[in-house]
Image: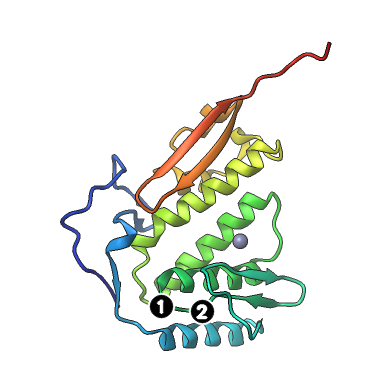
């Protein structure tokens, strides 16, 4: 249902294209071309919300952001202009379906995986979105890591595998404060050594 306009003139920033849980990471998002309309997207989201007994806030976000209220089974989503907005809406539904999980970065991973798998089931080509999804999960891991809420070595294997193409060595984060930036062109990981000062 989704096609890439051209895949010739993109350079991939990843060394190896490997398959992750049956999904192959690839192409730059800006090459994305989609023939579905926002009417189709709205139907997808309406049907899923009906299936999972979720209500949608009438007022929509103008930018691709969303919110969810798990106990109320209520979400606020963006205007569904394109695939990014659709994935944001699927992500918010995923929060209701999955419920609260600790630590937060594992919840965000589970929710993203649900959104991606649901889109795949709907025959939506999620491949160009994946890098963004992985960067998002990695950013959440970084936040939990920086706040000392997780031990990077004890993260579940499947979440490590999900971000592996962007960060194959999470253990190298130990002793560093980490920030993940995604520019649509490439993902940048910035590590800053944590310096401990003795109080005088
Ligand atoms: Zn989320």
Q: Which residue is mark 1?
A: 122
Q: Which residue is mark 2?
A: 79
Mark toward the start of the polypeptide (2 vs 1): 2
Q: Is residue 166 visible?
A: no
Quarter of the picture containing the N terminus is bottom left
Residue lying at 27% horizontally and 47% vertically, measured from the top left: 12
From the viewer's perspective, tell me whether residue 89 is left or right of residue 22.
right
From the viewer's perspective, tell me whether residue 128 is left or right of residue 70.
left
**Callout 2: few (<14), some (14-19), or many (20+) C-alpha neighbours within 10 Å?**
some
Task: Single out the mark in the foreground, 2 or 1.
Answer: 2
* x and y, in percent, of residue 197 in the image: 74, 16
Instruction: Identify which residue, 45 or 37, lies in the foreground.
Output: 37
Q: Quadrant of residue 151?
A: top right
84 versus 52 height, above or below: above
174 versus 103 height, above or below: above
Q: Are marks 2 and 1 in contact (CB under 8 Å)?
A: no
């Amino acid at each position: 249902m989704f096609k890439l306009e051209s895949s010739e003139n993109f350079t991939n920033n990843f060394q190896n294209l490997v398959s992750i849980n049956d999904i192959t990471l690839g192409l730059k998002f800006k090459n994305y071309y989609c023939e579905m309309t926002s009417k189709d997207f709205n139907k997808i989201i309406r049907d899923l919300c009906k299936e999972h007994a979720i209500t949608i806030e009438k007022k929509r976000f103008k930018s691709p952001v969303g919110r969810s209220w798990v106990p109320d089974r209520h979400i606020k989503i963006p205007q569904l202009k394109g695939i990014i907005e659709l994935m944001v809406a699927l992500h918010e539904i995923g929060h209701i379906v999955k419920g609260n999980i600790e630590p937060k970065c594992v919840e965000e991973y589970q929710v993203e995986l649900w959104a991606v798998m649901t889109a795949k089931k709907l025959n939506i080509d999620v491949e160009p979105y994946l890098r963004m999804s992985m960067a998002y999960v990695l950013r959440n891991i970084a936040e939990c890591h920086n706040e000392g809420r997780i031990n990077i070595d004890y993260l579940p294997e499947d979440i490590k595998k999900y971000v592996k193409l962007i960060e194959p060595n999470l253990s190298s984060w130990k002793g560093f404060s980490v920030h993940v930036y995604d520019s649509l062109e490439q993902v940048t990981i910035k590590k800053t050594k944590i310096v401990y000062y003795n109080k005088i």
